[in-house]
Image (tube, helix red, strand yellow):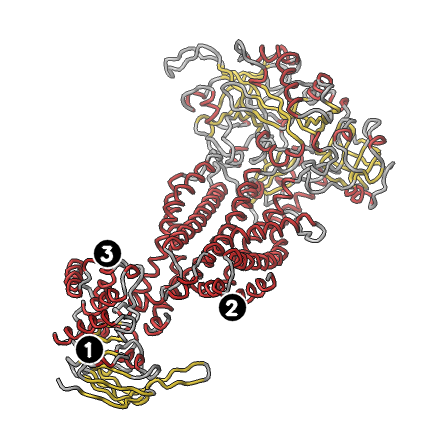
Amino acid sequence: MFQHYLITAWRNIIKNGLFSGINIFGLAVGFMSCILIMLFVRDETGYDTWIKDSDRVARLHSAYTMPGRPPFLTVRSAGRMMEAIRDYASNEVESGMRLIQWGLTVQQNGEAFPEEMTMVDGSFFDVLDLPFAHGDRSSSFNKPFDLVITEKMANKYFGRTDVIGETLTLCCAAEEPTVMAITGVLKDLPQATHLNVNLLIYLQPALFANNSSVLDTWTSVNVYTYFKLKPTTTIEQLQSRINYWANNESPFVQTIANDIGAMQAGSKVTDVMQHKLMALTDLHLHARKDAGNMGDLSPMGDYKMIVMFVIVASLILLIACINFMNLATARASQRAREVGMRKVLGASRAQVAMQFLSEAVALVLISLLFSLVAVEAFLPLYNELLNRELSLQLFSDPQLLLTLLTGSIIVGIGAGLYPALFLSRFMPAHILTASKGGESRGSTTLRTALVVFQFATSIILVICTVVVYGQTLYANTIDVGYQSDNKLILNVGAANGNLQSLKQELLNLPEVSSVVFSSEAPTQDNENNRQFTLIPQSADANTSEGDAAPIQQILNYYSTDYGFFEAYKITPIAGRVFDEQYGTDKAVQQPDGDNNVGTASVILNESAVRRLGMSNPQTAIGRTLESGIFDNGMHRLHIIGVIPDIYFRSIKFDIRPSVYLLREDHFRAANISFNTNDSPALTSKIEQIWKANVPMQPIHLQFLSEMMAAQYSDDVTTAKMFSTFSLLAIIVACLGLYGLAAFTAERRTKEIGIRKVMGAQISDIVKLLIWQFSKPVLIANIIAWPIAAYAMLSWLQEFPYRLEAIWLLPICVATGLLSLLIAWATVGGNAAKVAKNKPVHALRHE
Amino acid sequence: MLKLHNLSKYFQTDEVETVALNNVNIEIAQGEFVAIMGPSGCGKSTLLNIIGMLDNPSEGQYHFMDDEVAGYSESQLAIIRKQHIGFIFQNFNLIDELTVEENIELALLYHNIPASERKQRVEKVMDKVGIAHRAKHRPGQLSGGQQQRVAVARAVVGDQAMILADEPTGNLDSAHGQEVMEMLKALNAEGTTIVMVTHSPAHADYARRTINLFDGHVVTENVRAA
């Protein structure tokens, strides 16, 4: 019997070429999208699960939520937290470990290589038990500067992996280059980890002795803190212990109460300062919500994006399934006679239904086969887009194979069940005697509803794609408020005392028009927060502004050299920018700090003027700020100018109220303006100058335009993926519509014939058919617009600076017109073909 | 009214060419009532389809109201057809999705007639064939006789000069068949030309003239005395 089903299934697939083709193509595209997205999702959700005991490891994140200030979020924590919590919660914590990442230079054979160093506590491998290639965890970290490296690093510097006992020279963790002995070699880490560690150094608290804020602090967040929990403890249990400790026993209960002054009766430390644990295996996808602006050890995943793409893939598959259902029921009249005969010959309804189900499953399995071929074909492209190394290991991964097979059988049954029930319901007497097929009005209505659903889905996807693209375009073309063309950014952090000679040599290049230093270049996002106090001003007759009490605000500050604003073509809206001629602008550390009060000039941006409570830029000029910008002593800072709010950072973030100082010891970036089209020649000249001036340090030189584009590269990837998959959804939906139009035209052949006998012209018939298929598309638009608009308006909320909401209207209308055009183009050819038939053929059809 | 001269029709299926009509010469005057008879497969329906311009002849000439229409395109034929010819089929050929009055109105829909006038004319003709009480029903809900009355109404609602009836009584019992024949007779009496294909000699007797076809040829023409 089953063999008979298979044979009939196969013959029907072959016989109905259009029907089978549309379904196999649609389902294959649906499966392909699902498999591609599933590979990506599996990769994203599998981060760090390969680490031994990964379910017992958690990281401590910090959040400061002071009243009246935007929350400060970070996945780092303060240096003293690890020890304190480990010792306090000794019943819950098995082990704890801190990690600091630091950019250093490896000097080997007279060459310099920039590397990320990871300094870790000796307990690192107790918490994260990474597999060793050579050596083991007990022999690794026993004395200062013990170094554990990965196989990749070993191969890079020694050409082999068995390098225990070899040394590397690193510059400059301490003042001088340090020779470090390799005590262990780790196997290379798989790509699926949030850890980005290649060189692990046994953390030396002594290294930071003269910079107490790095480790010896309760509030400054510089380290990543990990705990391994005892097997019987849950993260929630440890979290509540930490909260209890923070509120009642921690050393900062009193400090917070005093310092912030925001503690009201009954409020707790955890109201303003949270230490939150996150499971190791959640870090990749969920750390983003705790990360603020500072990011993580490696690029973070985006849980929302994962959810979004899972939805899109499911929708494509659903659209393909709907095609199957629609076409199978639309075709019902063709097979009604067969069903009738089978029943007359003794088949039960269940047997007939079984036959149609096995046809559906057979079709789906064929589609799966095609989709696997397509996945293999498109994987390289997909990997390039996502920057991954995903692969489909079908035969070495029985779980995947089983998932795909079960999945497709479920899809087959899901898509085939309704047609099977529908077709098997036909009563033989009715079918064999009636002149028409067993088509009921109900099934036509259901088909129309399903077409509406398909088109509504496709339209929503198109609108979303256009908005996502629009926002990306907007972000890339927004007027950032400064001139970003023809700029190179040279990192001069390693150049120390050589800045002026370096600058002079760069200026000697004919292509270079200016070189100015600053603490950050645009797009470089560091938080340099200080408290600034606006000195009260007695009521002034001219300004009528006066404040009773000093206004204190924590503001971000940048250091910029003379000429910085000129180089970026930023004109002050009040006052002036830094000018060497005045001789009073520079901020210098006072000798014997505490008793002397230094003076310097500052420039504010408009947001800072507002934050400090001043009504307009003009009134700010001449006012004075007081701040301890150096580690000791105070400075009085005269406001000499106000500049417009510029997008120093990605437009994903608000513009920060900022103070610009002229403080040379903070200069880390050289902003080089150039005027040549031969940029390779220029960069190689700059590299030569760098090598001559700063030997043994690698150069960091980037075009500002590339740095700016990089800020949005994730969004571009998202937009590309989104548009690819929406396009697939639309193609599958249109194919379904095409098939449906073909079958409907066929089903309406008699009606069309009659209409033509009654005098209808070809154009009348085409109009009739086109209108029939325009109705569901129009309804789909009416449903899709509000849903898409709502979804996109909430998505845009994430961006402080975003596409105007009004843009949604033309996007919706244009998408609506497009969907109609596509439907017409799909249906029109078919309609014309049917309408051109001689009516006699149509009437003979009976 | 119409004149067929040496008209032939072949059907090409796969490798076999079938001759449906072979050198047919027929002339039908205005106001005539002509029956076409013959065994199954003799070409009756093909002849009627060509007369009704639902199909083109393969060879020969077809003069309809002084026009040579044999070479006309589908859309030119459509215009003549809707102006002058009404059809009645054995299987009624009503549109299942439309109501009785909508089916009848269909014959006026493509004539640029205002909706109000269409409604009037449909009501008038429904009264005439006695189907007004079923105006809102769909064909599926009617008996065969009622369906054919709807089809007759649809054929005459446009005041066509000629009605082509293809076995109009073939699917009806004798009482209903009789009814339809009386209706055609009455229409003919009002001046409508009627060409009818039938198997029933009794119904053929309603016609003034009977044309007998055999294997695509006209074999005899009998004219009854008035």
Check whether the beta carbons of the residues at disc 1 and disc 3 lie within 8 A of each other: no
How much space separates mark 2 and mark 3, taking CA atoms?
41 Å
Question: Considering depth in this image, is B29 or B181 the residue closer to the camera?
Answer: B181
Q: Position of residue A692 (x, y in %)?
A: 72, 40
Quarter of the image with the C terminus of chain B in it? bottom left
**Subunit bearing disc 1:** B
Q: Look at label 1 and name its amino acid.
A: Ile
Residue at left 39%, top 59%? A439
Question: Considering depth in this image, is A699 or A386 the residue closer to the camera?
Answer: A386
Q: Secondary structure at mark 3?
A: loop
Mark in the foreground, 2 or 1: 1
Residue lying at the far right of the rendered structure: A165
Q: Position of residue B225 (x, y in %)?
A: 14, 86
| For residue A632, side relative to residue B116 (left or right) | right
On the same chain, marks 2 and 1? The answer is no
Q: Which mark is residue A168?
A: none
Check whether the beta carbons of the residues at disc 2 and disc 1 lie within 8 A of each other: no
Q: Secondary structure at mark 2?
A: helix
Q: Position of residue B161 (x, y in %)?
A: 17, 75
**Up-down: is A156 above or below A25?**
above
Q: Look at label 2 and name its amino acid.
A: Lys
Mark 2 residue crowding within 10 angstroms, few (<14) / some (14–19) / many (20+)? few
Q: Position of residue A312 (x, y in %)?
A: 52, 46
Mark 1 residue crowding within 10 angstroms, few (<14) / some (14–19) / many (20+)? many
The quadrant where residue A757 appears: bottom left
Mark 1 highlights which residue?
B194
**Subunit bearing disc 3:** B
Q: Secondary structure at mark 1?
A: strand
The quadrant where residue B142 appears: bottom left
Mark 3 residue crowding within 10 angstroms, few (<14) / some (14–19) / many (20+)? few
Mark 2 highlights which residue?
A15
Mark 3 highlights which residue?
B136
